[in-house]
Amino acid sequence: MAIGGLLVTLAGFLIAALSVGIASATSVRLIIVLVGIVVSLGGIIGLINPAYQKNALWKR
Amino acid sequence: MKKISLALAITCLVGVFTVARAQTPAQPPPADAAAATAGQAPPAASSIDDQLKALSGPSAEERAKGDPAGTATGTVNDIPVADAKKGLTLGDVVSLVGQHQIAINFTWTLLTGFLVMFMQAGFAIVETGLARAKNANHTMMMNFMVYGVGMAAYWLIGFAIQEGGVGAVANLGGTAPLSSEYSISLFGKSWGLFGQNGIMLGGTSYDVGVMVMFLFQMVFMDTALTIVTGTAAERWRYSSFIISSFFMGAFTYPLFANWAWGGGWLATLGSNFGLGHGYADFAGSGVVHSIGGVTALAMAIIIGPRIGKFDRNGKPNTIPGHDITLVLLGCFILAFGWFGFNPGSTLGASANGNLRISSVAVNTMLAGMSASFSGMYYMWIRYGKPDASMTGNAFLAGLVAITAPSGFVNPLASVIIGLVAGVLVCLSCEFVERVMKLDDVVGAISVHGANGLWGVIAVGLFADGKSNFGGAWNGVPGSVTGLFYGDAGQLVAQLIGVATLVGFVFTFSFVLNMVLEAVWGHRVTAKVELEGLDIPEMGALGYPEFVLKPEPAAMKAAG
């Protein structure tokens, strides 16, 4: 799950960075970039961190 | 005899008259004569040179008498002459003006760089104060040696990656050797990825302007590295800290810094794709603080919490630091150093709009002030007491948040940015600890990560278009302007920077440290952690004459 989370996080960056080629209108680029940020944050908070929290020290 | 005497007298009179005319400064012509000469060609250089040659400063005899008022020191006699036979010329004077401009900028950049270097001391005592006494030596040593480790990595390769293709920096006289950037072509535009010149400051990069650039950029890089030591303190193996910091200084930081400051693709979002002036980060909310913050986040996830930080239900326990006086003193040292961090980022104090350093300095002060108030009152209202450590962190959060916008916003915006930062750091600390269940000893993820990103976004909102740093920024004419002043494209450029920090830099840092965890290991053993890292890791206590408080039984049981 951690590796998957890393890939999702990276994908969010790529979505945002490539927005400049996907669209030309500023408002559309803004939406695409925000989607990218949310995807990246989702990868970190929703996938990577929970994967490491499964074996957290305080649970042992 | 009379004829000879008369001839001699006439000759002497002619000679005296000629010399008198040469020494008398040229008087401005009468007004009607001036009108008559208007539109005519300026006087020939040779006549200007003649006038310059006629100028003279105090004689040697006059200087030998001493100069208590300072009025005879620093005169035309001090202007270096290129050709002694020709004497003082207009070219000599003009060359000196140019050198003075660059010298002012060199001096400014170097002195402000020295202030930023001193921030290492501030970080050291903030972190040590927030850690327990049994880890004081270890925490202090991490902050002490991160300076050397980071500098070594940066000198070896990091500077070349970051600045190798930055091109001419006018304020510093050109830095022409830094002109090799590796780029790819995408969507018909050039995307700069990393520099290729300046390894070990050798070859053509052995240049006085490049040296100034290296020193200034190096101390910024080290600030990013030291942020991570605060989050991972009290359980990070010293050897792992050295390896991790080296790679961060060699690759992680320089890569993003090239994209933002070294002529890379983030900076050219404006010139290539019409997004404002491209990613604009005046002094490094994103480049320095966010890189440190997201790397700290990666480390916190990988290394895990301290023993006893969370109980069996995941409820966080407070582990107080051992010296709050060190913490607040450290905050003041950091604030002092920030007068180098932000104003110094003009890379000069002469020409090219650089007198805006006054505005940058005041913006910095105001944001720190307003953040300390909003953070203190948030804690006071929510928890009943004005918490000292969170007030200090709020102060720092405001300084972090204003770092990117400091060159582009007005004082009112600075206060607002700080007010938001002070509350944001408190909310972020609660989220990181209670929701993500991460242990951040000093709150670096929230101070530097969350507020670094806020600072990046704030540029896209509050930049007022009134700054003028040489008529352009990132190659786009005009002044950086945010959404509230009419340019939504700038906000998009800033958000792409945010996405890069969160999506790429975090991933890059995480992978580096995940590999290091697999091959070497980050964390000390439970026994070492409970005993304190000072003796097992460093061989000596930070406070050998103090009797350390024994660990609570519950904490020992958890280990």
Image (spheres, grey):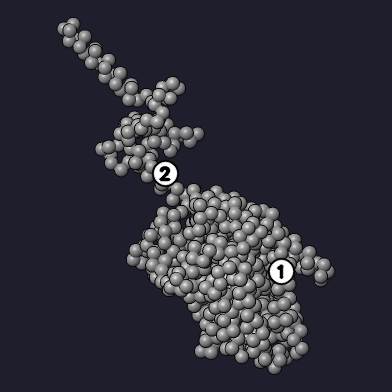
- The image quadrant of residue B92 is top left
The 10 Å Cα crowd at callout 2, few under 14, some 14 to 19, many 20 or more, is few
Residue B190, horizontal then vertical, whole percent: 44, 69
Q: Residue type at mark 2: give it.
A: Val
Which residue does the image show at 55% across and 48% down from the upper left? Answer: B355
- The image quadrant of residue B3 is top left
Is residue B308 visible to the viewer in this orientation of the structure? yes
Most extreme residue toward the bottom is A60
**Quarter of the figure that contains the C terminus of chain B:** bottom right
Most extreme residue toward the left is B1
Q: Which mark is residue B424?
A: 1
Which residue does the image show at 53% across and 80% down from the upper left? Answer: B508
The 10 Å Cα crowd at callout 1, few under 14, some 14 to 19, many 20 or more, is many
Q: CA distance from mark 2 to mark 1?
A: 47 Å
**Quarter of the figure that contains the N terminus of chain B:** top left
Pointer 2 residue: B97
